[in-house]
Amino acid sequence: MLLEESSFPSEAQSGLSQSGLSRAQEIRRLAALQSYEIMDTPAEAAFDDLARLASIICNTPISLVSLLDGERQWFKARTDQNWPVSTPRELAFCQQAIQGKTLYEVEDATCHPLFEHNALVTGAPNIRFYAGYPLLTAQGDALGTLCAIDTVPRRLNDGQRDALAVLSREVVAHLELRRARLELEMERQKLDDLLRLANGTAESLYLSRSHNEIFIKQDHRLIRLKTADIRYVEALGDYVNIYAGSERYTIYSTMKELETRLPAHDFARVHRKYIVRLDRIIAIESDALLMETDRGAEGGPSLLPVPIGNSFKAGLLSRLNLV
């Protein structure tokens, strides 16, 4: 049978939490555990490997990465899949282990006053031996333990104890790496959300300013372009190339969408693949036009032939007052 709770002083009377830590220590410890967002997550190879290594080194059938919240101990890793996923906290050997900073070892639980009546000792899984090293954060808070368990009494040697200490630090290191990855992913998501918001806001702002400027997204940056600097636009599959000044910008967009963002009195769609700035047109020859792109090395204009689509030709000639 379990020891009756009435045989112990209440938390209010003792000033201690059920773990034996002070109330302030327990609150800080639980906050630290929550910050790792680890409870009830799926198995991960890094933690499974460390538990297995602890079991091999300590020569025990069971090794666990155990984490204690306010009500239970939950196992992030366990070498025996028949072992329960969690157990009530009041039954946890690890609850004693997290009160210290070094190894907590019980050679024979049936002879130990704290555990001889424990349900995990008197019944399945019939724990006899326990050795647990606390998983200590840099601030000294114990999140749980890396522990080795057997159903027969035993004792670790000095080398096994040292190895368990090293492996417990590796568990904490992996917890830190995991938390860092989560934080980086959250920051990346925030930046993406801000970029989408800024893009939409900027486009609305500058569209309201007579289309004199537009914003484009380039390599996770927003770039403001003066429409007066844009010479022509070229379709490229799901992308478009914008030629402005001496620069070329490749963005994910459609010609139709971009056409609505450019000032209609300055630009014309002359082909399904081209939008040109009207004041850059030098000549029209049959089904093509010549447009000025950049100044050549001699200082003269550099000309680019651009095809004119049949469905766009009449509109272009009208715009140029040629019909």
Image (cartoon, helix red, strand yellow):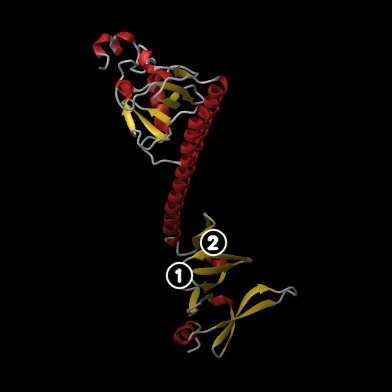
Residue wearing tag 2: 225
Which element type, helix, strand or loop, lies under badge 2?
Answer: strand
Q: Quick check: 221 above or below 89?
A: below
Q: Quick check: 306 above or below 94?
A: below
Q: Quadrant of the N terminus?
A: top left
- Residue 216, position as x, y percentages in the image: 50, 60
- Residue 67, position as x, y percentages in the image: 40, 29
Which element type, helix, strand or loop, lies under badge 1?
Answer: loop
Residue farthest toward the front in the current orientation of the protein: 152
Please name which of the two marks, 2 or 1, marks the residue nearer to the observer: 1
Q: Which quadrant of the figure has residue 285?
A: bottom right
Identified by mark 1, the residue type is Thr
Instruction: Give left or right: position of 79 versus 243.
Output: left
- Residue 146, position as x, y percentages in the image: 46, 28
Residue found 48% across the figure and 82% down from its top:
319
For the residue pair 288 and 53, the one nearer the viewer reads as 53
Residue wearing tag 1: 254
Label whose residue precedes the other's in the sequence (2 or 1): 2
Identified by mark 2, the residue type is Leu
Instruction: Give left or right: position of 306 versus 272.
Output: right
